[in-house]
Each structure stands twice: as C-alpha cells, then as structure tokens.
Image (tube, rainbow, N blue to C red):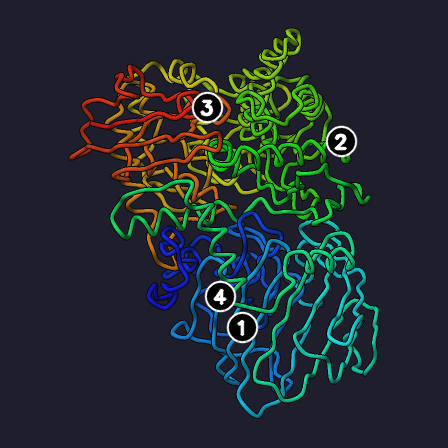
Amino acid sequence: MMAAAAIGACAGNFTKYVNPFIGTGAIEGGLCGNCYPGATMPFGMVQLSPDTHPAPDWYNASGYDYNDSTIYGFSHTRLSGTGACDLIDISLFPTTTDRTSSAFSHEQEEAHPGLYRVELLDEGISASLSATERVGIHQYDYPAGHQCRLLVDIDHSALKGSWDRQIIQGQLRQVAPNALAGYRWITGWAKLRKVCFYIEFSAPIRHLALSDGHRQEPGQVINGRALKAWVDFGQMDQLMCKVGISPVSWENAKENLQTEAPGWSFDDYVAQADAAWEQQLGKIAIKAPEDKMTTFYTALYHAMQQPNLSSDCNGQYMGADFTVRQMPEGQNQYTTFSLWDTYRGAHPLYTILDPERSRDFVNSMLDHYEAYGYLPIWQLWGQDNYCMIGNHAIPVVVDAVLKDIPGINAERAWAAVKGASLTPHPNSPWQVWEKYGYMPEPLQTQSVSITLEDSYDDWCVAQLAQRLGHDRDAQHFGKRAKNYVNLYNEDTHFFQPKDENGHWIEPFDPLCHGGNGGSAFTEGNAWQYYWYVPQDVAHLVELTGGAKAFEQKLDQFFTLTDQSGEQNNNVSGCIGQYAHGNEPSHHVAYLYNYIGKPEKTRALVARIMDEMYDNTSSGYAGNDDCGEMSAWYIFSALGFYPVNPASGQYDLGIPMVEEAVISLPQGGEFRIVNNLKSQKVKSVTLDGDKLTTLFLPHSSIAPGSTLTWK
C-alpha cells in the first residue's frame, strides 16, 4: 500500500493525509468501499486509474480491486463506491511487445491525490498518471533499448452483456502526426452514452495498426464496434500521452486538452492537481490523532470525487435528449447523481462547503427535468438509469432553495419538483399513490420502502410549496407526506405491505431481507426501514407507543442479531439489525436524541466511527456510494449529522476531532472546539450560549460561529 514517505515531497498540508487505497479491496470478503486509487481532480470529468479486470463488473465496480495482481490498462472514466459498474472508457496500455496486460505489486505502486504510479513488472515499464478536470495525463518510462508501443483500446469496457451492455458504433482516426481521435456510442447501466476523445503524444507516430476486432491493418481511420489501435514510436525511453475527453465531439475533446493541458511537464500536472485538492480539502482543517486525520481526509477526498463535470471548456454538453446544449457563462453541467445515497449526507455537506457548485448541481438537475420530463433518479453521463427508489433529487433541490443558495430560480425549481411528483415514471406510479394512499405490493414491488421514501419526498415538496406561497399544493403534498401511516400495523408495530384491497400480506417476517424487486423492502428488511420517517420522528415515537417503547425498540434494533432467509449483500457493517454498510440505517443512531437519550446516540456514533472505518484497503463497511459513506463520517466526526437533510438543522452526536475549522465560502469560519474528556457531555455552547436542544440550525453555521463541547 502507498507509503506516505514516497509521496511526501509533493503533498500539501491536507493531501498528505489522503490514502487513495482505502476502500479499494476487501481483506476478508464482504464489501470494502469499491473505490479506486487513480488520478482525478475535484468533481472532474476524468478518473484515470488502472483496471485490474479485463471487463469489470458488480464486485469490482470501480475497475480496481486491491486483491488483484494484474493490470489490463488505464481507462479514463469510472464510478467510485457504487454497487454496479459502468463507464470504463478509453483504455491505454504501454508495452514493448504485443502484451495486453501485466503483473504488478503493491510494493511498486503509489497513489496520492492527482498522482498514481505503478511498475508493470512483465516488461519493466513504469506508468505514471495524473489528470486535469477533462484530460488524462500519462507518462510511461520504457526500459532502455526497447520498442515503445502503446495499445489504445476503445473496445475495453465494463462487462459486455451486463445491463445489456454493447458498443453500438465507434471510430478511431489519426488526425495529426502525433494525435489520434475518435468516439464510441455504448449502452449499459446508462442506456446510451457518447464518449469522444483526442489523444496527443509527445512523439510522432512511426506506425499505426488499426483493428475492428477481426483484422489488423495499417491505415488512418477505422469504424466499428471493437476498435483498437497499436501505436509504435520506435525506440524511446519515455512517452507522454494527453487524453482529452468530451461527451459532445472529438473537436471539443481537443479544445479541452489545449485549454487545460498545453504543456508537457508531467510534474507540473501533478503539482496542479495536488494544489487543487489542497484547496478543496483545506475547506475543513481538523486536529485529530494521525490515523483519524487519514480517515477523515480520505473520506473528504472520496466525497469530492463526484458529481462529475459533464460540460466542456466551451460550455457545451450533451443534454438528456441527446441534443448539444450550452451552459451560461461561469456555470458547469454535472452528472453522476447517485441520489438515493447522496441526498442524505453528501449534498448537505456540499451546501456548507461549496454552495456555488451546489447551485450547478441543482441547475443540472433542473436542466435534466426540462429535457427529459423527470428529475434525475440515478443520472450517469447525462442519462438516467432509474436505479433505486424514491425521487431524491427533490430533497436536494428543495434544501438548496430553502437555504437560499444564490443562482437557483425558485419558481423553476418548484415547477420541476411539482412536475416530478405528479408525472408517473419508473418506481413512481403516482396514480396508484393518489388512489390508495400507499403503494400496494401487487401493483408496485418494493412497496413499503417506496411508500416511506415517497412520503418523505412529498414532505419536501410541501415545504417548498409553503415557502413559495402555493398553499393548496402545500396542503396536498403535506397530506401525501403522511401516507406512510397507512402501512403501519399497530398489531406488529412494523411498517408492512398491504394489497390493493387494504389487507396485510401474510406471512410477514420483519427479519426477511429484500433486494431491488420481488419484495416489499429495498436492500434491507422491516427492522431497517422502521425508522425511515425523518420528517416526523415525533409521530413515529407516538406510533411506537411513546418514548419508553421507542427506546426499547431502538435498543432491540441495535442488539438483535437474528437473521431469516438470505441476507441482502448490501446489508453489511452490522450492529444488531443496524447495517452501516447501507444507507437506510445511517440516521438511526441519532434517533435517541428525540427521546432525550443523547448519551446512547453518542456511544453508538463513536462506536460506528471506530469500528466501521479504518485505513486499509477494506476501510469501509459497505460501498462508499459516490461519497455517501464518507459524508456520514465527515459529519459525524465534526459532531453533527442531518437526520432530515432538507430540514435546515443537524442532529448533535459527539465529535471525533479535537478541533475543526470550516472555511465558509461567504467568508468567516465555523469552529468546533472539543474539550471533552469522555463521552459524558456537560454542555454544548454556540458562541458561548448554551444550546438548549440537541439540534444545530444551519443558519448558525453560515455566518460563522464557534461550537464548543465541554
């Protein structure tokens, strides 16, 4: 694994604590994070990293697994922490022969924000990678006296056939003595993507052989569905390659390259990437033990790898309707919205640290709605794959408007939020919702989970309607927000499925796990979904039978280890029925606050931080899910967390940091001072005034203040 000393010379005050190998491979089975160690910029379009599988799939979704020992190429796009694989575009592999893979060892591998380096052992080639926002930077050092060859593979992808993945068409052409360009159209988890590229080499091409999967021949252009190029440069000790990408055209990819990467100094690109990450990570300065510093800043690094840029330097991007569109000056289009995960903690974190980028995130979602007719569910490379349930762009949009983030048109946001809540689409048959007041299991699978999550989204819609004075809509969606009550069984004290006639579906087993269809619950069971009423915890306490009964049920939740049937593989990192490895459980430890038992919240939050995160390749208890697992740690380490992410308040836990300073974009600082000697808290003060509740309003953070724990 990366040795800090090996990269210390180029690391700043904050980047030196980032270990990109955290979460890249399970040590003893299970889930690890599904992260990658390669080079990227904050929220960049390019993620340049090694692929340790010839065709990555579900259990190596980032393309890299720390337990592997072979590299098959370095591709330019990928997902971080997801449970499914896609992207993996435009692979380069250096060789002196016709080799297409090489063994590697972690002893000759290092990673750092903006830098990845590895020795390809089979031929003694050293590969170094860096990146700008839209350009991948490669430097290959070849053994002296050998031929310098390169395989450019645009057939390489995630597993063909998975998600019906196939390449529809592509092109490779030589466009200059030292440059290749082209594109490919590919289907997969994202149903149709256009990926364009422009590759510039530091030396002229001596010989070019093009292949469409069936033949190999010299030439300057080839079209097909399995395209590769063998590029020969003669005998050279070192080759640099700059790869610009674009969703629009190879001409735009070239412009991206010329704008962001005009020079040939690899070290300059590494320094630029380190500086960009230093600035981004430095938005939170903490004091903590050394190992906790690494866990914290690596989590912050992972949280800031996505959403990803999808507009070019000239502002053009590919719309959801496959038309080329133009961004306003000074704004960017973004994609990679894993919203079922990231609405909970990651997006609230962005509203604190990066409200200007949050503006662009929200406006990107509104652009998607206007082009596509729905707000994004799980948007990837500008296209929706409809993965997961709920309509969780809604809380992100609503939260941004309610927090008065500049640059978001509130009435435009309202039109999208209301429209998305009335127009039926996959997993959201609103006509059924309106008719029954719940999702009947025979008519809609995952019915209990969808009922609970749609109730929350409707609560968010009602809040925005109320803010904007749309009183009838506020009343309508406020009523829909209470639909969760219709699936509460007072006899079993669980939310459970009903049929369309209002009858409970039997038999009912609260321990039985569901997946992503064929069950009333999504990636969990009735125990894990019991607590999903973040908009009205007080009413959930009442339904449970009062504070004492609620406490007893929470206690049982964190201690009951029984299982029934096959356990969903996303349910990991368990404390009793609590599963920190998947998002539905993430807020539950904080619910003791609502019945006046904050000491239990503190004990559990501290335990989760200690047990579910570490500095190894198996450092996460589950998939990082585009930074959501990381966002939970960042918030919790600071001492608070958004149980209801659109409420404008945070629930107090217990800080891990000894001290923290959040540099606010508006100017000023929010300070956290931890004077605790144990988990016993005597008082929490805000600018010297004692907090009388267990909740911290967002409005107290924004202008700058000091939160002190004693």
Quadrant of the drawing holding the N terminus: bottom left
Which label sits on residue 534? 3
Q: Is label 4 in a helix, a strand or a loop?
A: strand
Tell me the crowding category of disc 3: few under 14, some 14 to 19, or many 20 or more residues within 10 angstroms, Cα based. Answer: many
Q: Is label 2 in a helix, a strand or a loop?
A: helix
Inter-mark Cα distance, 1 to 2 = 42 Å
At x 57%, y 57%, the residue is 47
Which label sits on residue 116? 4
* Residue 244 visible here: yes
310 relative to 354, above or below: below
User: In the image, what residue type sits under mark 3?
Assistant: Pro
Nearer the observer: mark 1 or 2; the answer is: 2
Sooner in the amino-acid sequence: mark 2 or mark 4: 4
User: In the image, what residue type sits under mark 1?
Assistant: Ile
Q: Residue 118 in the image: x percent, y percent? A: 47, 73
What residue is shown with label 2? Answer: 370
Inter-mark Cα distance, 2 to 4 = 39 Å
572 relative to 264, above or below: above
- Where is residue 610, by image quadrant? top left
Q: Residue 254 in the image: x percent, y percent? A: 73, 60
Tell me the crowding category of disc 1: few under 14, some 14 to 19, or many 20 or more residues within 10 angstroms, Cα based. Answer: many
Number of residue marks: 4
- Whether pointer 2 and pointer 3 mark residues with C-beta atoms closer than 8 Å, the reply is no
Q: Is label 3 in a helix, a strand or a loop?
A: loop
Q: Is residue 63 left or right of residue 32?
A: right
Nearer the observer: mark 2 or 3; the answer is: 2
User: In the image, what residue type sits under mark 2?
Assistant: Glu
